[in-house]
Amino acid sequence: MKKLLDAIAKKLESMVPEYSLVGDSIFFDTQQFPWAEELEANWKVIRQELEQVMQRTDALPNFQDISPRQHRIANDDRWKTYFFCAFGFKAQKNCERCPETTKLLEKIPGLKVAFFSILAPGKHIPEHRGKHKGIIRYHLGLLVPQPSSACKMRIGNQVAHWEEGKSLIFDDTFLHEVWNDTDGYRVVLFLDIARPLRFPLSAVNWLVCQLIALSPIIQVAKVNHENWEKHFEALVK
């Protein structure tokens, strides 16, 4: 299945410039995604629920504990995750602990992945790129340590900084890397959204996302998350 997905994704990537309803660029404007305005308007509500989660940061899973394929870019305990959903899988208990965030997420069209992405002080994510141009990456700044010059992301030849309560929307198929060279945690609400496309590429993209949901990558992540969740539930009782 991996070879099939890679072949379809490569073909889709070549067609995106012609069919994309939001253009083909590194960064996108918040106005192109109207739902982002509601997230920004409610960012303090989301952060309140995040603060409860952060009380047990050490018990949260590392990214590679959930998705082993991330091991090249996440091989220590300084990139923690708190998943809400991923390609059809819903982390029910996590959603119940953050009901207001979950309600906001349920309104987003084309949502494929959602989690709190938590980078510990000193974390560096090496250069990498996504493989599927049918997905657009979204970050909502929730905890952004200072100085901003030491907490940044380079995408292509451009550098971006997060702001609390503000959206950062980009195409992750461009090479990018991240630094948190501060003394604090950097946390964003991390979303993957199906790129708005004209038909028939929209239908092809839907099919690719369905195949991803059935792939071993997602199935393994689902089992890993369920195992972690059982352990975490026992811990918080």
Image: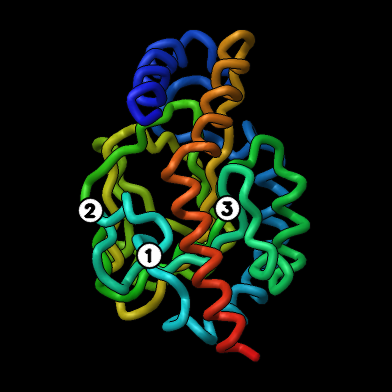
Which comes before the other along the chain, label 1 or label 3?
A: 1
Residue 193 placement (x, y as % from top left): 57, 38
Residue 214 in picture, x, y percent from top left: 53, 37
Q: Residue at x 69, y 63 (%)?
A: 92
- Label 1: which residue? 65
Q: How many marks?
A: 3
In front: 16, or 140? 16
Q: Which mark is residue 114?
A: 3
Q: Badge 1: few (under 14), some or many (20 or more) residues near its Cα, within 10 Å?
A: many
Tell me where residue 114 appears, x and y as whole percent.
57, 53
Q: Is residue 23 left or right of residue 77?
A: right
Where is mark 2, residue-wise?
72
Kindly tell me whether residue 181 is visible in this rendering. Answer: no
Q: Amino acid at mark 2?
A: Arg
CA distance separating discs 1 and 3: 17 Å
Which is nearer the eye, 7 or 185?
Answer: 7
Quarter holding the C terminus?
bottom right
Q: Secondary structure at mark 3?
A: strand
Q: Residues within 10 Å of mark 3 (few under 14, many from 20)?
A: many
In the rendered image, the vertical position of residue 109 relative to residue 177, given as above or below: above
Q: Which mark is residue 25?
A: none
Q: CA distance from mark 1 to mark 2?
A: 12 Å
